[in-house]
Amino acid sequence: MQDLNKLFALQKASTNKLKKRSVADRILQLKHLEQLIILYQPAIETAILADFRKPPVETMLTEIVSVISELRHTIKNLKDWTKPKKVGQTLALLGTSGYIYKEPKGVALIIAPWNYPFNLAMNPLISALAAGCAIVVKPSELSPATSALLAKLLAEFAPTDEVAVVEGGVEVSQALLALPFDHIFFTGSPAIGKVVMHAAANHLASVTLELGGKSPAIIDETADLQDAAEKLVWGKFVNAGQTCIAPDYALVKQEVKPLFIEAMKQQIEKCYNADKQGIAKSDSFSRVINDRHFSRLATLLQEATSQGATLAIGGETEAATRYIAPTVLTEVKTSMRIMEEEIFGPILPILTYQNSEEALQLIANLPKPLAFYIFSRDNEKINKYIAHSTAGGTCVNDCLIHIAHPDLPFGGVNNSGIGRSHGEAGFLEFCNQRSVLKQRIGFTGIKLLYPPYTDKVRNLAKIFLNWV
Ligand code: NAD
C-alpha cells in the first residue's frame, strides 16, 4: 500500500498554496480538466465497457456528458460563487456589514462507487477543485479498469500534492478514513455510509454522504401509461438498474395495472430487442457488475417467485455472463426481501394500491428515499403526493433526469444521504462558509450596553428587546 501518511502530509502542506490560488487560475485548471476528459473519451468508454459491458453510448451520455456539463456550469459560475456574499442589515448591529466568505475546507477525501465509476468520482472532484481543496480520490475496486484510468488521467492532470488517486479496496478505504481529512465525500451504500460517518467522527470531519435506498415510482389512474412506461423502462434498465436513483419499485393504481404492464412489455422489446435476436444479444443493455451482485439479485428474484410473486416480464438469468433480463414482477408483497432492500439491478416489482393514502403509507413505512417519481396528470394529486411524503429529490412525469439540472442540489435525506452535490450546492460542501462582520471604529450602539449595568443600560436593553 502507498504511504498514505506521507501523501496526506504532502497534501496538507499544499492547502495554503491552494487557498491563495486565484479564481482565474482555478478556472484555467478546470478548463484543462475539460480538455483532458475530451481527449480521454474513447479510453473512458473502453474502460467502463470492460468493467460491466456498459454500452459506449450510455457511457457518453451518463458519464461523460454529465461531467462535462458540471465542468462547464462550474467554469461559468465560479467567479460568482466565490465572491463574498453580503448579507442584509440588522437594526441591533446598525453600522456593521456582514459577509459570507467561502474558503476551502482543506484536504478532501472522495470515496466513489463502481456503478457510475467515472461520473461519481469526477463530479465531486470538480466541486472540490472549484473550492480550492487538495483532494484524494479513492475509486471503487469493483470497477478496476475505470479505477486505473482515473489514476492515469488525474496523474496527468495535477501534481499529487493537489490531486491524488489511491486505488484499492476496503482496507485502503479504511486506512484513508483513519486520516484527519477536513471533508469526506462518500458515495455508496447506506451501510458503508455509517462506517464512513463513524470514522469521520474521530476527527470531526464534515461529511457528504450520497447514499441509496428504495426509490418508489407511483403511477396513478390519470397517468399517461404509454409515456410512463417509456420513461420507466429507460430509468429502470439504464446501467442494468444499477443506478442510485433508479425507480426501485412501482406503485400502480389497481385498475391500470394490465395496461401499464403491456406498455412496459412493448417498450422493453422496442429498446432492447428491436432486431428480435434476444435481449441477451443487445448492445444496448449492460451486465451486472460482478458474481456476488449477480447471485444476490438471482436469489432475490428466486425467493420472491417462490413466495408467490409472478414474472410478468423477463426473469431469464445467465451466471456466466452476469446477464439478468429486464424483469417485471407482480403479486409482490411488502414482506418479501425484494421489498426490504435496495434492488440495484434490472428487476422492477410492481405493487398495486386502491387509494393514494395506502400508497403513501407504504412509502412512509420504508426509510426515506433518494428519489420519488410521480406519474400523473392530476396537479392536485401531484401536490398531495409531494406534500405527504419526503425524498431527496422528486421528478414529476419522468425519472432520473432531475439529477441533470445543474441548479437543483442533488442528495438524499437521512438513510438516503446527508448533504448535497452538483453546482453551487456541491461547491459549498467543500467550502467553509465563514461569517465575517465588519464593525466601524469609534462610537457604536453596542458600546452603550457595556457595564456597569445602570438603569440607563437596562432601559436601553428594553428598547433593544423590541428592536431585534
Ligand atoms: P459500497 O458502499 O459498497 O462502496 C462504496 C465505496 O466504499 C467503494 O469505494 C468501496 O471500496 C468503499 N468501501 C466498501 N466497504 C467499505 C468499508 N467497510 N469501509 C470503508 N470503505 C468501504 O457501494 P457500491 O456497491 O460501490 O455502490 C452501490 C451503492 O451506492 C448503492 O446503495 C447505491 O444506491 C449507492 N449510490 C448512491 C449514489 C448517490 O449519488 N446517492 C450514487 C451511486 C451509488
Image: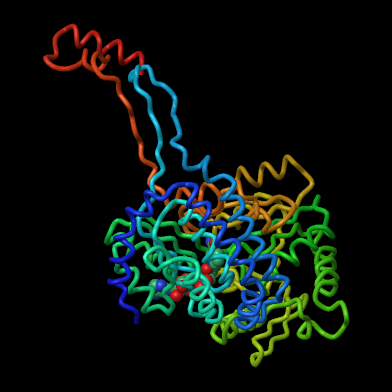
Residue 171 image position (x, y, % from top left): 36, 79
Residue appearing at x 50%, y 71% in the figure = 156
* Residue 285 figure quarter: bottom right
User: Is 37 situated above or below 430?
Assistant: below
**Closer to the camera in the image, 123 or 355:** 123
Residue appearing at x 63%, y 81% in the figure = 52
Q: Quadrant of the C terminus?
A: top left
Residue 333 image position (x, y, % from top left): 64, 69
Residue 174 image position (x, y, % from top left): 35, 73
Q: Residue furthest right?
A: 275
Q: Residue furthest left?
A: 452
Q: What color scheme is it? A: rainbow
Residue appearing at x 50%, y 42% in the figure = 81
> Would you say residue 421 is visible in this rendering?
yes
Q: Quadrant of the N terminus?
A: bottom left
* Residue 239 figure quarter: bottom right
Query: Is residue 342 rendered to the left or right of residue 42?
Result: left
User: Is 319 situated above or below 242?
Assistant: below
Query: Is residue 260 rendered to the left or right of residue 214?
Result: right
Count of labels in the image? 0
Residue appearing at x 37%, y 50% in the figure = 19
Residue 223 image position (x, y, % from top left): 80, 52
User: Is 383 situated above or below 191?
Assistant: above
> Would you say residue 288 is visible in this rendering?
no
